[in-house]
């Protein structure tokens, strides 16, 4: 059936009060390049074509309608995006470098933008950016010289990936000012230098990056844009803070009207539900007034009095055998609580009153299942925590059972002999004295026992370290199929004066010289990843509050190490 028929019974606003043009017909006309205002009798022909298609080929008709509706939705979304963006007017390009550009190391930020080489700053203009203001708060005149004592509004975009003339990855960013600033730049080189320095300062603050002091203007109007040559400006997103106060007020008024329309539709729906058998006034849930509830204080009643009150409630209106009947007999008032002089026995607590509510333990199923808790078993061993304890306090860490040592060729499989037993077995070395009045030197015995225990613990710790290290190598090698010694690079973390220092070691290798150009470093707030032909390193940075834009790298050929310094927020 032609879906456009559903519009046939509605009166439109066209002349003569004819049928309102269906959306399907309008979409078809637009696809054919026909002006809506000049359609005239062609609308009836398209109507007939759609009707024939719906009857002769329903599947093709459904696909056509879906295609038109999807196209209309995409067009609406695209128009919405365009309404919240503006296209800046390109003027000139400034080329600068990141502060770590000369290190040779390729560094990318969290968005994947190359932040270690060249940076193209597109200086643009747009009428939407406010004209600079003087000390009186008035827009500057056209002949105002210099930037002294001026308030210059500007907008800084986000860093985005781009490519230079040679195809190498670089970064690009847009800075948009009022056209008055660009006009002054073209007239005065001093003014241009002031504008560029102002833009670079705000760029470093908003994008959290550091640039070298040197910069120069190149012979281009725009870099890192769209088009075959990348010279077409990229649409600039409009933030609410960038809108003119008048435009912002219009935007808020539009949102307010949309909300009122939504509330009106919701109210109509609720009223319709009320008329169709719902609650009066469209309420979906009936409200309970406080006057329909009775409150009975049972805190001072005996168990018998509570039972009697429940029986009276069950027999009265609203429940029990007396439900639905009108009570003619006046309900007795609740008895007064007995006083201490009447000799009433204290109320007995209910049978389960002393039983504590145990939450999920009250259920039928157990928390840990039939086998009970796994705590203390080998599966609950935390390797990273054990390593931290061994680094902080080896003697204390030796008191914990390490399953790695149990799996390492039985080195630590047997329990060590009790230290006191060893001390007593060596009592032959103790001088007990000769006379009957001489007794055991208990202080010396205790010192000997403590010494034996310390030696045993130290030997156990050394054996555990060797066994755990051997096992770690085996497990790391078997974790990755085909793993080699180059797969994982060793590293260490240290808090330095300039930030967190990550020292990555490349090992002895084959004597090949290290090159920063062969390394790819990616830094984010959560992690650091170094990819090289010598191996890879992944460092978890969670909890260190890293500033991903402040990265320095220094290589030592002699030590075959790379020290990466990460600034902190």
Image (cartoon, rainbow, N blue to C red):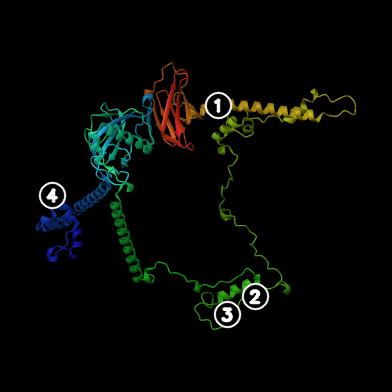
Are there few (<14), some (14-19), or many (20+) residues within 10 Å of tag 1?
some
Of residues 66 and 13, which is closer to you in this image?
A: 13
| Residue 1 visible in the snapshot | no
| Secondary structure category for the residue under label 4 | loop
In the rendered image, which residue does mark 2 sit on?
336
| Secondary structure category for the residue under label 3 | loop
Q: Which quadrant is home to the N terminus?
A: bottom left
Give how far across and how far down residue 162 sits, in percent: 29, 33
Of labels 4 and 3, earlier in sequence is: 4
In the rendered structure, the answer to whether residue 352 lies left or right of residue 12 reads right
Disc 4 from disc 3: Cα separation: 84 Å
In the rendered image, which residue does mark 3 sit on?
331
Are there few (<14), some (14-19), or many (20+) residues within 10 Å of tag 2?
few
- Residue at image location 38% in from the left, 37% down from the top: 205
- Residue at image location 77% in from the left, 26% down from the top: 425
Of labels 2 and 1, earlier in sequence is: 2
| Residue 73 visible in the snapshot | yes
Give how far across and how far down residue 355 sits, in percent: 63, 59
Q: Residue furthest bottom?
A: 328
Q: Disc 2, disc 3: CB below 8 Å?
A: no
In the rendered image, which residue does mark 1 sit on?
469
Q: Disc 4, disc 2: CB below 8 Å?
A: no
Disc 2 from disc 1: Cα separation: 78 Å
In the rendered image, which residue does mark 4 sit on?
33
Are there few (<14), some (14-19), or many (20+) residues within 10 Å of tag 3?
few
- Residue at image location 50% in from the left, 80% down from the top: 325
Of labels 3 and 1, earlier in sequence is: 3
Disc 2 from disc 3: Cα separation: 15 Å
Disc 1 from disc 4: Cα separation: 76 Å
Of labels 4 and 2, earlier in sequence is: 4
């Amino acid at each position: 059936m032609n879906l456009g028929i559903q519009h046939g019974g509605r009166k439109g606003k066209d002349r003569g009060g004819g049928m309102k043009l269906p959306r399907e017909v309008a979409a078809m006309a637009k696809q054919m390049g026909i002006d809506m205002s000049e359609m005239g009798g062609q609308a009836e022909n398209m109507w007939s074509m759609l009707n024939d298609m719906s009857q002769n080929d329903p599947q093709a008709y459904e696909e056509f309608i879906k295609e038109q509706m999807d196209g209309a939705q995409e067009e609406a979304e695209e128009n919405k995006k365009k309404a919240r963006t503006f296209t800046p007017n390109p003027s000139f390009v400034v080329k600068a470098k990141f502060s770590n550009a000369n290190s040779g190391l390729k560094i990318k930020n969290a968005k994947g933008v190359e932040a270690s080489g060249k940076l193209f700053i597109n200086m643009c203009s747009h009428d939407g950016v406010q004209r600079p203001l003087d000390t009186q708060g008035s827009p500057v005149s056209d002949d105002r010289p210099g930037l002294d004592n001026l308030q210059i509004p500007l907008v800084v975009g986000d860093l985005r990936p781009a490519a230079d003339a040679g195809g190498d990855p670089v970064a690009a960013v847009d800075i948009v000012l009022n056209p008055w600033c660009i006009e002054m730049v073209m007239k005065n080189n001093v003014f241009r230098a002031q504008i560029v320095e102002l833009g670079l300062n705000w760029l470093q603050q908003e994008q959290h990056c550091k640039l070298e002091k040197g910069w120069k203007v190149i012979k281009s109007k725009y870099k890192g844009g769209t088009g075959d040559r990348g010279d077409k400006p990229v649409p600039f997103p409009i933030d609410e803070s960038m809108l003119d106060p008048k435009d912002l007020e219009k935007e808020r008024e539009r949102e307010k009207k949309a909300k009122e329309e939504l509330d009106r539709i919701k109210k109509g729906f609720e009223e319709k539900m009320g008329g169709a058998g719902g609650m009066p006034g469209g309420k979906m849930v009936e409200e309970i007034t406080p006057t329909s509830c009775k409150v009975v204080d049972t805190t001072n009643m005996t168990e018998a009095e509570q039972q009697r009150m429940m029986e009276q409630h069950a027999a009265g209106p609203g429940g029990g055998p007396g439900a639905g009947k009108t009570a003619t007999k006046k309900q007795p008032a609740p008895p007064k609580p007995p006083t201490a002089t009447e000799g009433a026995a204290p109320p007995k607590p209910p049978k389960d009153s002393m039983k504590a509510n145990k939450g999920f333990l009250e259920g039928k199923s157990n928390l840990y299942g039939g086998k009970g808790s796994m705590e203390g078993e080998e599966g609950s061993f935390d390797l990273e925590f054990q390593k931290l304890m061994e680094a902080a306090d080896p003697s204390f860490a030796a008191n914990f059972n390490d399953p790695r040592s149990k799996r390492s060729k039985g080195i630590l499989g047997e329990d060590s002999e009790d230290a006191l037993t060893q001390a007593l077995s060596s009592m032959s070395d103790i001088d007990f004295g000769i006379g009957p009045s001489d007794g055991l030197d208990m202080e010396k015995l205790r010192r000997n026992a403590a010494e034996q225990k310390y030696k045993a613990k130290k030997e156990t710790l050394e054996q555990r370290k060797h066994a755990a290290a051997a096992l770690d190598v085996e497990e790391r090698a078997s974790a990755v199929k085909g793993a080699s010694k180059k797969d994982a690079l060793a590293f260490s973390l240290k808090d330095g004066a300039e930030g967190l220092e990550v020292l990555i070691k490349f090992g002895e290798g084959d004597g090949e010289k290290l090159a920063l150009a062969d390394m790819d470093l990616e830094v984010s707030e959560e992690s650091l990843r170094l990819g090289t032909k010598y191996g890879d390193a992944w460092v978890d940075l969670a909890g260190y509050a890293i500033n991903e834009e402040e990265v320095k790298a220094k290589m030592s050929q002699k030590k075959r190490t790379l020290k990466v310094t990460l600034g902190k927020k």
